Every structure is written in C-alpha cells, then in structure tokens.
Amino acid sequence: MSKHEVTPIDNSLDNFMIWVSTQIFFGKTALEHLPEGIDRYGKRILMLYGGGSIKKNGVYDQVTSILKENGYFVVELGGVQPNPRVSLIRKGIEIARENKVDMVLAVGGGSVIDSAKGIACGYYYDGDIWDLAGQTVSTDKVLPVLCVLTIPATSSEMATGSTWLNDTIVPHKKAGAHGPYVRPRVSYLNPEFTYTLPARQTAAGVSDIMCHIIESYFSNEKRAYLQARTAEGMMKTLIKYTPIALEEPDNYEARANLMWCGAWGNNGIIVKGNYVSWSVHGLENSINEACDNIHGEGLAVLTPHWLRWAMNDDNIYRYVDFAVNVFGVDPTLPEREIAEQGIKKLEEFYDKIGMPKKLGELGAKYEDIEKYAERFNIPSTIAYQDGAFVPIRFNDAVEIYKSAF
C-alpha cells in the first residue's frame, strides 16, 4: 500500500459515542474538594506518587494533611518513574489487595496516573497485568482512580488510556490498556502545583499535549469542522502560553491555560467523529523502549518528519488549515509552500521551547533504525495503522526515522 492510499474507517462523523465522565475540580481551591470525591468510593486509599518533587513543592503535605484530618486509612507507594514500570504496578496491585483498598489516589503526572490505572485494572483481574496490554478493558471491575495532577502532559487525568513500560522483559516493551472504566472518576487540577516544574519538564509536557492534538487533527474526516477548529484553538493556546510559562513559571494564567488544554487534548472530544490511529506515538514508542527517553521530547523530534512524509495531494488541505489557522501563514501562497511553512513554524516552536531536534540527542542509534521500525511489521500494529492518517509500514518507518537523525 502506498502512502497515497487511505483505508476507510467506520468510526465516522455519523456514528460515535462519547462519555467524558471525569469530574474536574479546577483552580486554587480544587484540593478542598478532595474528601468530597473520596467519600463516594470508600475510606481505604492507596496513595501513589513519584519521586521527591511533591514533597519539595508542598503538594504531598497538603494532600496527606487532608487525608489525615478526615480519618482515612492510607497506604503509600512512591517511586513511580517516567515511563511507568510494570514491575511497580505489580507491586502496587499486591499492596492494594493486602490492604483491601477502595480506590487509588494518584498524586503526580501522567506516569503516576497511568500506574494507578494499571493497579486499578489489575486489582480484580486474575491474571498478570501485562495480559491486558493492548486490550480494551470492558468490565467495570476496576478500582476507582482519583488524581491530583502536577504535570500537564498526557491528559491521563481525563482520558481512558493507560500506557506502561514492561521493564521485566528484554527488550523492554511499551503498551497499555484503555476503556471507559479506566478513566479517572475525579481529578483535581490546581495550576499552582505546576509552578515548580523544571523548564524542560514543562516543555516536554507541552510537546506531548501538542502531539495528541496534531495526531487527532490530521485525519481524513473532512466533515469534522468543529473538531478541527477546536483543535486549532488548543494548539494556539499552547503556542501562546508555553513561552510565558517558561519565562514566568508562577504566571497563573499561563499555567492554567496549559493545564486545561492538556486535560482536553486527549479526552476524546476532538477524536470522536474524527477517528484516526496515532502514528507518531507508535514511532516514538520504539525509541522510548530502547532509550527510556522523555516521551514528549521524542514526539517533538518525530512529529515534523512524520508530517513531511505523510503529505500528499489528497490531504494537503489539512496542512493548509494548520499553517494558516494555527500559525498565520499567508493563505495566498501556493498550497505546497503554505504547508511547508506550517511545518517549519512548528519546528521553530519546538526549538523556542528547548526541545531536541534529532533522535541522536535522545540516545537513539542510526544503526538500530530497522529494530525501531520492526513494530510496523507486527500484524496488530499493521491493523492499527490501517486507520491512520496515512498508513505506515516497515519501510515507511525506516524512512521517517532516517530523516530524524
């Protein structure tokens, strides 16, 4: 199949279902409502978090103080790493079962929330959690997940998906599960909790959000006008406020806009009726498995190269929309020139916020390109890519990787 052929997909504008059921408490008073959310599900809590950042910035003290004041039973599990490990999820499942918890409270970013979702999915499941990798979890036998967000990036605080890195096999593999009952029940979003984020983490998180939106925006559904215009507004929000947040880390307006954009960038609102399988994430997952790099940085490197590779006469209309509506490129120029300028503007944005430009900066090796591309020979991945903006096969992936070195 050439890159000019597009496989029809069933999930069109005519038929879809969406139920964004997460309750959001947003703003400076968000955490005051923590007991309100917890009390719906019980009193016994597994509290999950990462390294020491929430202890340094005071979020840990705020959360644990509320939990103590309200008399909840709490067992803690720290040490969640970026690219959440299956080994820790298995440990969390054991702890949750031993303590007969009623819910998992994630305090952190996407890796912490995705780990919490893994624990929630595995709590009632008889087999190993990795059995669920790549699967849709259709049962409601999933522990409730609540989260206090500290890093806008993955949208896991409002999304049905959960991605894990299996660190117990060699080579490591990255996959996950999704489903309506995996979506968090309640999420608490206070932009002040992101003030102390390092610039690199802020920028990588934005790059992750931007890729979620771009991969939803570049679809073959021409009738999804509202979804496209909504996506453009989100991208313009990131472009406007990211430099401000990097320059003024405690600028509430900037942090609030980034946090809210992150939550909505991957909660389904711009995907339903506008379905497309994500390709850049598939390409980056292979790099992530091999290099254990920061996910958003890998996406920033690969997205422009994928966009150039995927452009053709049938889909250039979307590139023109992107360049003109998001970056303000002159609409009177020839289409191809408009499209190229749009991609160049995106690269300039990534450069402005400090993202790497080449795969080698992430630790990837040119001689391993065919290994990275191997997932595009796997039948399940090929089937997934049939619903992509432009389907990718092994040789296509090799081409894109080469261009990114």
Image (spheres, grey):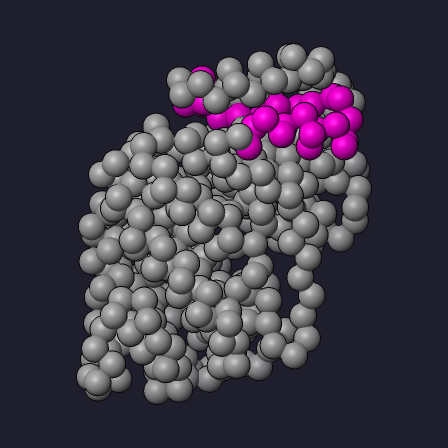
82 lies left or right of 359: right
**On the image, which quarter does residue 371 sit in?**
bottom left
What residue sits 29% from the left and 34% below the top? 249
Q: Position of residue 370 (x, y in %)?
A: 37, 59
Which residues fall within the magenta stretch?
A: 30-55
Task: Report the number of discs.
Answer: 0
Q: Nearer the viewer, residue 309 or 369?
A: 309
Instruction: For the C terminus, give its image quadrant.
Output: bottom left
Q: Nearer the viewer, residue 75 or 151?
A: 151
Q: Reply above or below: 216 against 363.
A: below
Q: Nearer the viewer, residue 62 or 356?
A: 62
Q: Reply above or below: 90 against 178.
A: above
What residue sits 46% from the left and 65% below the top? 230
Q: Reply above or below: 93 against 62.
A: below
What residue sits 39% from the left and 65% below the top? 232
Please check the rendered image and state whether residue 374 is part of the magenta-colored stretch, yes or no.
no
Q: Does residue 333 appear anywhere in the picture? A: yes
46 lies left or right of 235: right
384 lies left or right of 198: right
What residue sits 41% from the left and 31% below the top? 192
**On the image, which quarter does residue 345 sit in?**
bottom left
Q: Position of residue 124 (x, y in %)?
A: 78, 36
Please check the rendered image and state whether residue 47 is part of the magenta-colored stretch, yes or no.
yes
